[in-house]
Image (spheres, grey):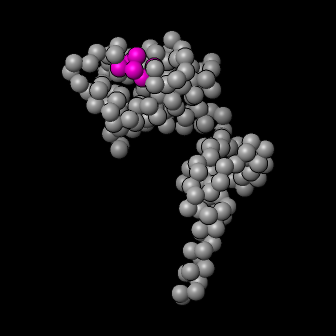
C-alpha cells in the first residue's frame, strides 16, 4: 500500500493547492470520485485498451450523480490519462487528511446499530469533541451487530460503548 500512497501524494497535494479557495466543495466531489473509482467493473472498463479517456471521464461523471465543476473534470481527466484511476480513493483520503490538518479537525466514523438523526448527531458530536479534544467531522455507518450504543473511530483511537463490546467484556470476566 505504500506504493499507492506514494503515487497518490503528488495528486492530492496538487489538488489541495489548486482548490485552496474552496476546499469544502472540492472535498465533496473528490470523495465522491474516490468512492466511484473503487468499483471493480469501472477499473476493468478503464483498463481496456479500446476505452478512451473521454469515455471513462463521462462514465465517472455520470455515476457521480452531481454536476461536477470544470476543475473536477480536468482533475479526473488528468488522473485517468495518467492511468491512475485505481489511486483515486487514496488521493481522496490524502486530500481529506490535508484539509483536516489545515482546519485542525479529524474525521470521526460513528458506527451505530440504529440511524442517528441530525439533532442527536450534533449532541454526540459535541460530547465526542470534548472527549477527543479536537474538532470532528462525523460520519455515521450503520452496523446492526453492535446491538445498541455506538463505536467511534477517530484516526487510531477507538471509543466503544456498544452493547456488543460490553457483552464481550462480561464474557471475558466470566470465563477468567
Q: Is residue 27 visible?
A: yes
- Residue 53: quadrant of the picture: top left
Between 112 and 10, the residue placed more toward the observer is 112
Residue at the image position 32 percent from the left and 39 percent from the top: 3
Residue 40 drawn above or below residue 56: below
Q: Residue 151: where, in percent of width, then height?
A: 62, 58
- Residue 19: quadrant of the picture: top right
Check the image and name the residue furthest to the left: 49
Q: Main secondary structure of the magenta part?
A: helix
Between 153 and 145, the residue placed more toward the observer is 145
- Residue 81: quadrant of the picture: top left
Q: Is residue 41 left or right of residue 128?
A: left
Q: Is residue 129 visible?
A: no
Magenta-tinted stretch: 56-61
Residue at the image position 59 percent from the left and 62 percent from the top: 146
Q: Is residue 142 left or right of residue 73?
A: right
Residue at the image position 51 percent from the left and 14 percent from the top: 71
Q: Is residue 114 left or right of residue 93?
A: right
**Is residue 128 rendered magenta in the image?**
no
Q: Residue 158: where, in percent of width, then height?
A: 59, 58
Residue 82 drawn above or below residue 149: above
Q: Residue 29: where, in percent of width, then height?
A: 54, 25
Amino acid at each position: 500500500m505504500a506504493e499507492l500512497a506514494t503515487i497518490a501524494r503528488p495528486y492530492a497535494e496538487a489538488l489541495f493547492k489548486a482548490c485552496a479557495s474552496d476546499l469544502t466543495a472540492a472535498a465533496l466531489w473528490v470523495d465522491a470520485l474516490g468512492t466511484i473509482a473503487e468499483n471493480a467493473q469501472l477499473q476493468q472498463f478503464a483498463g481496456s485498451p479500446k476505452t478512451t479517456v473521454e469515455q471513462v471521464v463521462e462514465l465517472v461523471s455520470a455515476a457521480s450523480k452531481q454536476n461536477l465543476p470544470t476543475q473536477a473534470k480536468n482533475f479526473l481527466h488528468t488522473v485517468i490519462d495518467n492511468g491512475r484511476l485505481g489511486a483515486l480513493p487514496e488521493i481522496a483520503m490524502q486530500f481529506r487528511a490535508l484539509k483536516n490538518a489545515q482546519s485542525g479537525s479529524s474525521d470521526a466514523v460513528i458506527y451505530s446499530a440504529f440511524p442517528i438523526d441530525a439533532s442527536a448527531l450534533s449532541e454526540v458530536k459535541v460530547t465526542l469533541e470534548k472527549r477527543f479534544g479536537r474538532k470532528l467531522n462525523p460520519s455515521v455507518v450503520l452496523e446492526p451487530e453492535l446491538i445498541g450504543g455506538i463505536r467511534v473511530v477517530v484516526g487510531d483511537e477507538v471509543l466503544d460503548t456498544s452493547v456488543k463490546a460490553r457483552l464481550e467484556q462480561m464474557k471475558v470476566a466470566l470465563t477468567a
